[in-house]
Image (cartoon, grey):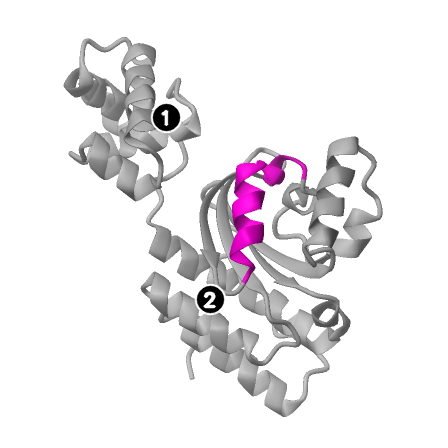
């Protein structure tokens, strides 16, 4: 079986049994053929059936210059409590969750170890809420792309997953392949070029503007309101010193071109 090497592929962990090695290789092979969100959910559900946990979620987000997730773009919920995720989003817990400030790609993170080091009042309030909802223990794996600012985190809730050393090693090896699958499915715009005066969210809007998408279509793609899209479109037009939407697209595409293409020869 030939396995394509993804970005940041990790070596197969030592110490696995022959059966565990085969399972991991099968996981990696299957992850490489995932093309839809439903296929990814089915695959993660299959992985979960072999883990001592009932709760798993995969999230994809933009990274800051410290390789930390600064904004969630997609959350693929397989079996997390819906009420907890709704509360998490409504209360903007990502701003206070210590797990969201990990340096993506630097190895598995045990929640309890990270939670025990929390000092801020908001962090402690979040941890208290997590415990009340039965989400105070778990393990998170992460991966990041080398050529853009997109990272992903895979989280399993519960005490038992982190105690299973073989499972932790297997999932850590699998995560970069899941990251690649998530990127294929999400179809996110590339990172904003350094020479463009737009925030990443504004560039995301511009990316779809330049491909002829309407405000309603962009809102659907990015899972935000049409009113929010209109707000960002106005900012794009203003920041690019354009007269209208079409003018902004022309100016923005010129700025986004590599210098070798822009310069006249």
Does residue 27 appear anywhere in the picture?
yes
Using the rendered view, name the quadrant where residue 53 is placed. Answer: bottom right
Q: Give the quadrant of the C terminus.
A: top left
**Viewer-nearest residue: 150 or 244:** 244
Mark seen at residue 127: none
Q: Which residue is mark 2?
A: 5
Q: CA distance from mark 1 to mark 2?
A: 32 Å
Give the residue drawn at x 77%, y 72%: 163
Q: Which residues are magenta?
A: 80-96
Considering every residue shown, the one lying at the far bottom of the view is 18
**Viewer-nearest residue: 132 or 221:** 132
Tell me if mark 1 has few (under 14), some (14-19) or many (20+) residues whose alpha carbon lies within 10 angstroms of its own: some
Task: Measuring from the top left, give residue 128's x and y in whole percent.
Answer: 76, 46
Q: Give the quadrant of the N terminus.
A: bottom left
In this rendering, the answer to whether 28 lies above or below 118 is: below
**Viewer-nearest residue: 218 or 237:** 218
Task: Measuring from the top left, give residue 32's x and y in whole percent.
Answer: 40, 69
Q: Classify mark 1: helix, strand or loop.
A: helix
Does residue 258 appear anywhere in the picture?
no
Using the rendered view, name the quadrant where residue 88 is placed. Answer: top right
Q: Classify mark 2: helix, strand or loop.
A: loop
Q: Which residue is mark 1?
A: 202
**Viewer-nearest residue: 173 or 130:** 130
- 164 displayed left or right of 240: right
Task: Measuring from the top left, give residue 42's x and y in whole percent.
Answer: 41, 72
């Amino acid at each position: 079986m030939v396995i394509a090497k993804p970005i940041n592929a990790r070596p197969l962990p030592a110490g696995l049994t022959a059966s565990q090695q085969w399972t991991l290789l099968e996981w990696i092979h299957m992850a490489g053929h995932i093309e839809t969100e439903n296929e990814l959910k089915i695959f993660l559900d299959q992985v979960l059936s072999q883990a001592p946990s009932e709760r798993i979620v995969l999230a994809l987000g933009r990274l800051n210059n410290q390789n930390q997730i600064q904004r969630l773009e997609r959350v693929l919920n397989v079996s997390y409590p819906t009420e907890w995720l709704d509360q998490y989003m409504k209360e903007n817990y990502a701003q206070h969750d210590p797990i969201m400030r990990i340096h993506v790609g630097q190895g598995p993170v045990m929640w309890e170890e990270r939670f025990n080091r929390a000092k801020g009042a908001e962090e402690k309030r979040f941890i208290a809420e997590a415990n009340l909802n039965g989400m105070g223990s778990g393990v998170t794996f992460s991966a990041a792309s080398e050529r853009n600012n997109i990272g992903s985190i895979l989280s399993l809730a519960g005490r038992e997953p982190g105690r299973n050393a073989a499972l932790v090693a297997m999932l850590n090896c699998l995560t970069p392949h899941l990251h690649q699958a998530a990127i294929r499915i999400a179809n996110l715009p590339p990172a904003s070029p350094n020479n463009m005066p737009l925030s990443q969210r504004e560039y995301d809007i511009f990316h779809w503007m330049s491909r002829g998408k309407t405000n309603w279509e962009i809102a659907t793609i990015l899972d935000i309101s049409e009113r929010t899209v209109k707000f960002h479109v106005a900012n794009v037009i203003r920041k690019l010193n354009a007269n209208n939407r079409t003018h902004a697209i022309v100016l923005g595409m010129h700025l986004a071109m590599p210098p070798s293409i822009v310069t006249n020869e």
